[in-house]
Image: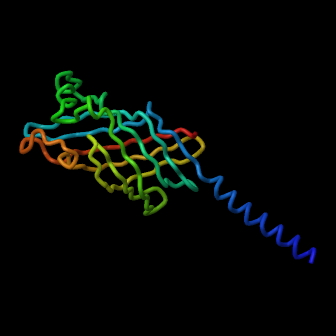
Amino acid sequence: MKKSIVKSIFTLLFIGGISFGAFAQQVNFNVDTKSSKIEWSGIKESGYHDGYFLLSGGSIATDNGKLTGGNFIINVKDLKTAENIEDFEKHLKNADFFDVEKFPTAQFTITKVTYKDEKECEIEGTLQIKNVSNPIKFDATVQSVSDKGFFSHAYLNIEKSAFGITYGKGHIHEKVHIAIYLFGKKQ
């Protein structure tokens, strides 16, 4: 009887150790707002405009070195254009584009991550711009998950009218090219 109890206790400790070991592999990161950014490029009849948004917060969840979830907040109010033209930046901040007085931030929340191989994955989530939420799906590369930090990048297109941005219809291409560079620091 004593051997059976001792064996049961060791079995519970072993299973508990495995569970604790798996739990210990879950690591959360804070979005590194100084390094992370979202670049954008919009095509128009006479060329293109491009620029970037910085991030103002968020978190990244990982398990066993794999991205599992998270979200990040996009600082729309302080958007920048590559040309650094103040009047153009003001125009993008107006109500016919981002309406930053009402909607100073946008947000992306990851709802599902499916890995294709060691670093390549498909991310599904909800993007909210101007209080309009839409599901989006895109491929991403999770370059690094370690004690030193997290880094991933992705390239995708979004349709601006899906988020209530209708300015320039017929003169500005509907799709906006996006590049996401997401860095995280261990919490």
Position in image of residue 35 (x %, y %): 44, 33
Residue 182 vs 125, above or below: the answer is above
Q: Which of 133 and 66 is in front in this view?
A: 133
Asked if residue 114 lies left or right of residue 106, the reply is right
Query: Which quadrant of the figure has residue 3?
Result: bottom right
Query: Which quadrant of the figure has residue 39?
Result: top left
Q: Give the farthest residue toward the bottom.
A: 1
Position in image of residue 98 (x %, y %): 23, 35
Q: Nearer the viewer, residue 71 or 130?
A: 130
Asked if residue 74 lies left or right of residue 59, the reply is left
Q: Give the farthest residue toward the top.
A: 86
Asked if residue 138 lies left or right of residue 97, the reply is right
Asked if residue 151 lies left or right of residue 92, the reply is right
User: Could you tell me which residue is drawn at 28 percent across and 28 percent down?
Assistant: 80
Query: Which quadrant of the figure has residue 186?
Result: top right
User: Could you tell me which residue is drawn at 48 percent across and 43 percent down?
Assistant: 59
Quarter of the picture holding the N terminus: bottom right
Q: Nearer the viewer, residue 59 or 49?
A: 59
Q: Which of 69 and 45 is in front in this view?
A: 69
User: Could you tell me which residue is drawn at 29 percent across and 30 percent down?
Assistant: 79
Quarter of the picture holding the C terminus: top right
